[in-house]
Structure formats: C-alpha cells, structure tokens
Amino acid sequence: MSENVSLHRRSLLTRRQFLLYSGLGAAALGLSACAAPPLPATLPAASTTPQATAASSTAKSADLTFRLTVKAAEVPIFAGSPTRVLTYVGEVLEGAPDAVMNLPDSYLGPIVRTTRGQRVRVHVHNTLSEPTNVHWHGLIVPAEMDGHPSRLIEPGQEAVYEFEVRNRPGTYWFHPHPHERTAEQAYRGLAGLFLVTDEEEAALGLPAGAQELPLILQDRRFDRNHQLVYIAAGMAGMMEQMMGFLGEEILVNGRPNAAFSVATRPYRLRILNGSNARIYKLAWSDGAPMIVIGGDGGLLERPLTYPYVMLSPGERVELWTDFSQRKAGEEVKLVSLPFEGVEAGPMQMMMAPEPLPNGAAFEIAAFHIAEAVNAPLALPEQLLPFERLSPADAVNADHPRTFIFAMDDQMNWTINGRRFEMDVVADDEKVRFGATEVWELINVMDAPVAAPNAMHHGAHMQHGGAGTMGGMMAGMKDFMAHPVHVHGVHFQVLDRSVDDAQRRGWETVNEGLLDSGWKDTILLMPGERVRILVRFDGYRGVYLLHCHNLEHEDSGMMRNFEIV
Ligand code: C2O
Ligand code: CU
Ligand code: CU
C-alpha cells in the first residue's frame, strides 16, 4: 500500500520536473565550454539561509571557497538536439582557481581537488524548483555538513557547507541526498568528484596531469529526442523502482561511446561507479590483469592484482594502467564481463526482460594508443601505509551488530525490518564515539527480517496471504545484491561467507570483490554475510547507513545511526 503512495508521489514530482525543464528551456543552457556564455565573476547573491551551518559565517577564512550552483541545463550528449539535465556548476571564490574544474560538454559536476588538512567552504545555491542538498560521499565531515535528508536547501536558497578535509589521499564524490529524491536527482545529472591529495601521495610520483583519467561510469536511458528516461508509470515502473533503474546506454563522464587517446606510458585511472543500480565487472578486453592501487578510502598499502574488479554503485577503484608495452595504433577496451547471481530467479521471471540486465556483458570505453613515447615510470612497490583493524580492537568481537538487508512482506526494502524514519534512531542504532565494532551485514534467506538486536521493534516477519504479491515475495530475501554504504566512517572488511544455494552466482564475482584497504561502500551479494570492522573516530552525530542502489535507498533501505 505505502509503495503505491510513494510511486504516485514520484510521478507527480516527475511531471513537475518536466514543467521546470520546459519553462527554463534555452535560458538554462550551460556547461559546454565553447557554447556557454562565461559565468559572471560573481553570481547575484541569493537569499542566504545558513541552513547547513550557522558557524561558518564567523569562522576563519577557508583554504578553498567555491560556489556550487545546482541548475537545470541542456548539454549536447548526442548529435542533434541537446539533452535536458540537472547539473552542478562550480566556481572558485577563494583559493586555487584550478581547484574546481567543470567538465566540458557533460552534465557531471566539477572535479574538486583538495589537499588533506585544508578547510573547504562550499556555497550551494539551489536554483531548482524542488529541495536538494549535498552529501560528500566518503568524506568524514561533521554530521550537520553530511547532507542528511532532514537538512535541505529549499528552491532559491543557498546553504553553506564547511569542513576540514581529513581523508586519506583518494577519490571521493558528492551527490544530492533528499529522501525519495536522491535517485532521480542523481540520475538526471547531479554528481561530481572530490579528490584529496597530500605530500606523501605527491612524493609517490603517480601518473598525473594528462596521465590521470577520472572515469565516472553511469548507465542511462534516452528517448528518441535524446531526453533522459527515468522510471515509467505502471507495472514496469514499479518493477524498476523495486529492482533499481538500469539504462542500456553506458556513459563515461557523461559521454556515450567513450574513447581516450593515450600514449605508451602508465596512467592512473580513478573510476567511480556513479550508476543508480548497475554493477560492473571491470576488465581489460585482452585479459590483462587489473592493477589496483586504491579504493574507497584512498590509496592501498601496495598495488594488488585482480583478474577483474567488481564495482557496485558508490564504490571507487584506482587502477595503475601501463600502456608502455603496447604499440601505437593498438586499441584496448575497458569492458564489463558477464556475471550472475545479483538478481536471482523468480523475481527476474516476473519482469519484462530488460535490454541490458545487471550481469550482461558490454563495452565501457576504448583506449587508442595514439602516441609512442619513452617515459618510463615504475609502479611503486609501496603506496601509503594504513592501520589495520583487528577483531581484538572491537568492543563486540563475539557479538557482531547485525544488519539484515531484506524485503518485507509489503515489498518494502528494509534494514533489520525497518524502513527509513527521518527523525528516529533506535536504541540498537547508537554506537560509542571512539569505539571499534564488528558489524555483520546479512543478505541471506533464512535470516529473520528483524535482527535479533531489534526484536522489540519489528518481531518476526509476517507472511502475506498466499496468492498476494506480498505472499509471493515473502521469504524472498536474498534475491538481490545490495551495495551497502555507511556515512561518517570508513571500515575494513573482516570476512565474507556465502550460502551454498547462492555460491554458483557468487563465484562469478568473488575474485573481483574490493575488500582491501578502507571502504565506505561494499557489495553485499545474495546469500552473503560480510563482517566489517568499523571505528567511530570521526565526529559525533546522526549519520546514515543505506543501500546505494539508489532506488532501494529511496524506497526506504536506509537508517539513521548515531555516534554518541
Ligand atoms: Cu553516496 Cu548516502 O550516499
Ligand atoms: Cu555517503
Ligand atoms: Cu539494495
């Protein structure tokens, strides 16, 4: 029942969105470096509401201050008519002018470059006709700066986010987080990269400049007029909402048919899966191994070799890719290999066949070796050391805090049997500042929907009547993968175990699971239990834990947790 209500609401909003676009029309043209008029040095001041922070206006000056304007725009994605999108436009107000770089001809937001220890202040101006906000995915920032869905920037308003960059050198990102609207706002274009460096990293001499390639992977669906298509009305749309939205056009940095001209030398690829629901099994078309140098939480201790890399929504991976053994004129492709097990059995049979289901094979980007150069650069044996957590550090080594990711008999996605509640933190969702805990993330069939530590709340799952949709779905708990994301912390993977019933699909992905280094998002496969070690040493306050399949998140697979 509640699902219907939220779907109805969604389609109303979609229509409003459409009005917004058509109303702005060509006036909203922007982004394209050559076509767009240059931004004025200072935008007209918006009515300022210090929503995100009251302290910022009086605080000392920041090392980097920039404006992010959230706006509707049109970008040329295909030849012919441009595509209406949402976009972030960045503009440095104070600090290094090249610290915020807009991407030409792309809806994707700017690439922000910072140094660890810097103070960053961001004026976010919402010119949309609906509320939005910004979450700094992977960055450890105070809870009131984290883009919690209760802190929104109303249409026409501006908010200020301010924080110190505490993270290890690596690849982070930002996107909106308004409840029930995250998926569509991100889908329509709102996302950007936030890179962090420091002296130690610089001393490694990794490929930089033209040899550093950020690759944001997204799948989209377009109509014949090149306009983005999102969740449709009716049964098909209901299934897309339930499973997560998949597009059949693969975009890299907002562009289709991505191709890069490279030279015979090493490159640093910073790859973000910015898709709503698509999972990639990244590999090189010629079978060359993937050399991983970094993940969600920055650079690894040392490079690791993978046959392929699984990248679920929200996850990042950094690759060292050496083209120096290749010849000018050659080409190699970054592809996604086929895999199984992430959308299991009966559910898929109920769906109209999707053009490009999760697990299908496709090409992502071509790399043309355009130039032979002699610029040898060795892969460093050591990258950046980090502290390894062990169960002995945890306050609950023998009693992990459990989180069950499942669908209830109302077909709502839940965590421990609960949907997202804006202002609620249950007793078993409070953790101690400074503590290290073992968390067990569970996606298995025989787990009760309510976790043992949440019994007082939801009790056991009740089966719907036979023959009802709920009845059919009841008990189908482990039929989808969930990319589990935790705000406000990073964690380390302790171990994984998988049910025999789901092992066959799991074995098509398990060698590519990114479990090394610090993580903030992790692929939880059907049939799996994953134990992670989490240390709450950032800030106190209310943060989020959710599935980063953005349709799952919007339909309630999200909870607050509080660091007290
Ligand atoms: Cu990238 Cu709460 O999300
Ligand atoms: Cu996040
Ligand atoms: Cu999910």
Image: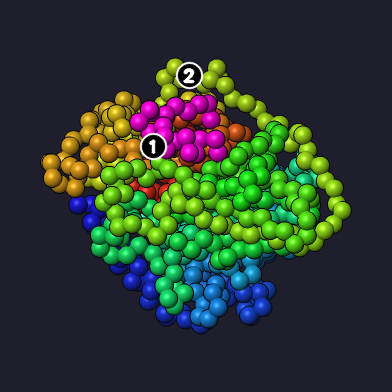
Disc 1 element: loop
Quadrant housing residue 107: bottom right
Residue 19 % position (x, y) = 37, 76
How far across and how far down the image is residue 329, in percent?
75, 62
Horizontal and vertical percent position of residue 395 = 49, 20
- Residue at image point 57% right, 53% down: 335
Three-letter code for the amino acid on which mark 1 is drawn: Pro
The reply to whether discs 1 and 2 touch (Cβ–Cβ < 8 Å) is: no
State whether residue 518 appears in this view: yes
Could you tell me which secondary element the residue under label 2 belongs to? loop
**253 in the magenta segment:** no
Asked if residue 60 can be seen in this view, the reply is no
- Specify the label residue 454 is tagged with: none
What residue is at 44 percent from the left and 27 percent from the top?
Answer: 497
Q: Earlier in the sequence, mark 1 or mark 2?
A: 2
| Residue located at (27% from left, 44% from top) | 346
Nearest the camera: 244 or 97? Answer: 244
The type of colouring in the image is rainbow
Dot 1 alpha-carbon crowd within 10 angstroms: few under 14, some 14 to 19, many 20 or more: many
Q: Tell me which segment is drawn in magenta.
A: 493-512
- Quadrant of residue 455 within the rendered picture: top left
Q: In the drawing, does residue 261 fall left or right of residue 251? A: right
**Residue corresponding to mark 2:** 397
Q: Is residue 529 left or right of residue 433?
A: left
Residue shown at the point (28%, 33%) measured from the top left: 449
Foreground residue among 541 and 284:
284
| Residue positioned most to the right | 374
- Say what amino acid the circle numbered 2 marks: Ala
